[in-house]
Amino acid sequence: MTMHILPAIDIRGGRAVRLFQGDKGRETVYPGSPADMARRWADQGATYLHVVDLDGAFDGNSQNEPHIRDIAKAVSIPLEVGGGIRDLAKARRLADLGADRVIIGTRALESRKFVDELLLALPGRINIGVDARDGRVAIRGWTETSDVATAHFLASLSGSGAAAIIYTDISRDGALAGVNLDAVRAATLATDIPIIASGGVSSADDIRALGKLPLFGIIVGKALYEGKLSLPDALTALAGRQ
């Protein structure tokens, strides 16, 4: 299975940003439009992009769809898009805008019926975001933590037909503190759906370590934006992980 490095593009208020552990009050804004960022990563060798509409994730309302369309038009590589997808119409709209895969999070936990509806309508194009905080699944843009154990939820998704699960360790996200390798490994063992790892990737060593697990991809965000890790170096580390 080909493993991808997915540069993250988080959009808030039409701008490319990064948040520290999902905290709206700890935001860094980067120059250039989201589409500019997409071109930058594609030009450096990215084979897949991870795009999140933060406004949609936080309150379900967003004006960022034009930016998602612009990203899809700006690059020829596939992108997965998430953030506030709580009905089939929104999922279809994002797919029509150019998303290769659509990511659902909160609603996946709230309604298995909704998951099944999406999988039927968009087969092979649904990724499920599972965000972990202290062993529980976080929801609503990480503003709430559910009572559902992460391992239980991952296991329940086995056989669902989802294309991939995006597993994020919130405690590591945006912290440049390294990955929680044990937690990612446990996620791969908990379900039969391919895992995309997210959270804490800050070095080529992190890429090499994750590259030894059976993952579909590795999302890298702040480390790229802060210059801690270049995309070419990340791709080289992934290629030489064995």
Image (cartoon, rainbow, N blue to C red):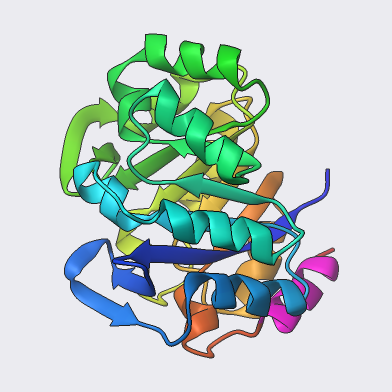
Looking at the image, residue 75 lies above or below residue 217? below
Residue closer to the observer: 92 or 139: 92
Q: Which corner quadrant of the image does residue 171 belong to?
A: bottom left
Q: Say whether residue 169 is visible.
A: yes
Looking at the image, residue 228 lies above or below residue 69? below
Left or right of 235 in this view: 186: left
**Where's the N terminus, which quadrant?**
top right
Residue closer to the observer: 84 or 241: 84
Residue 2 x %, y %: 82, 49
**Where's the C terminus, which quadrant?**
bottom right
Q: Tell me what residue is drawn at x 58 percent, y 79 percent.
A: 203
Tag count: 0
* Residue 234 falls inside the magenta stretch: yes
Looking at the image, residue 87 lies above or below residue 240? above
* Residue 4 falls inside the magenta stretch: no
Left or right of 226 in this view: 101: right
Prevalent SS, magenta region: helix
Residue 213 x %, y %: 69, 49
Q: Give the range drawn in magenta.
A: 231-240
Residue closer to the observer: 33 or 169: 33
Q: Tell me what residue is drawn at x 51 percent, y 43 percent.
A: 166
Q: Tell me what residue is drawn at x 41 percent, y 38 percent.
A: 130
Residue 146 x %, y %: 19, 32
Q: Residue furthest bottom?
A: 227
Q: Say whether residue 142 is visible.
A: no
Looking at the image, residue 70 lies above or below residue 95? below
Residue 99 x %, y %: 60, 44
